[in-house]
Image: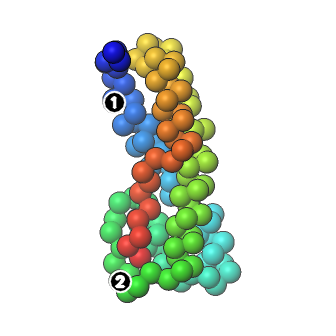
Amino acid sequence: MQQPPPPGASAILTRTLELIAARSPAIATPILDSALGAGTITRAEHAALLAELVGVPSSAGGPARDVVERLRHQIRAAIRRAAPVLARPLLDQAVAERRLTPAQEVRILRRLRAGVPLPVSSAV
């Protein structure tokens, strides 16, 4: 029988996901700036993709272009790679404060490496 999580484990996971979401625009910006500089996307697409990362629905309308979908994939991959690194200090602190068990920290880090639901949708 599995033991219930220590108090705060759910809150720590929520805070971890919020931290990753908050850092997502900074992770995506170099990817989008490069695509904009290369003429691969328009300024409107650049702005719409950044807006998606902070939860603002796209107002660009129209069918999604393949290049935009590829950029979404690149952004998701970059965020997924950065997620465990971003989360580690928060999780380590929670373990040190006994708000999270070491096993829970390992499970959360595995989940982050596998890919958490990320904010980049396919709305543009």
Residue 41 location (% of width, % of height): 56, 81
Categorize mark 2 by other alpha carbons within 10 Å: few (<14), some (14-19), many (20+). Answer: few
Position above or below: 105 against 117: above
For the point 49% across and 29% down, the residue is: 107
Q: For the C terminus, which image quadrant?
A: bottom left
Residue 103 appears in the rendering: yes
114 above or below 119?
Answer: above
State the image quarter where residue 15 is shown.
top left
Q: Residues within 10 Å of mark 1 (few under 14, many from 20)?
A: few
Instruction: Tell me which label, 2 or 1, sits earlier in the chain.
Output: 1
Residue that numbered label 2 is attached to: 61
Front one among 49 and 6: 6
Q: How many marks?
A: 2
- Which residue corresponds to the image point at 40% horizontal and 33% vertical from the top-left? 13
Q: Amino acid at mark 1?
A: Ala
Q: Position of residue 25 (x, y in %)?
A: 50, 58
Can residue 26 be seen in the rendering of this structure?
no
Measured as percent of width and height from the top left, residue 37 is found at 66, 78
Residue shown at 36% from the left, 25% from the top: 9
**Would you say 87 lies left or right of 34 here?**
left
Q: Quadrant of residue 121?
A: bottom left
- Is 50 located above or below residue 19 in the figure? below
Quadrant including the N terminus: top left
The figure's colour scheme reads rainbow
**Label 1: which residue?**
11
Q: Are marks 2 and 1 in contact (CB under 8 Å)?
A: no
Q: Secondary structure at mark 1?
A: helix
Q: Secondary structure at mark 2?
A: loop
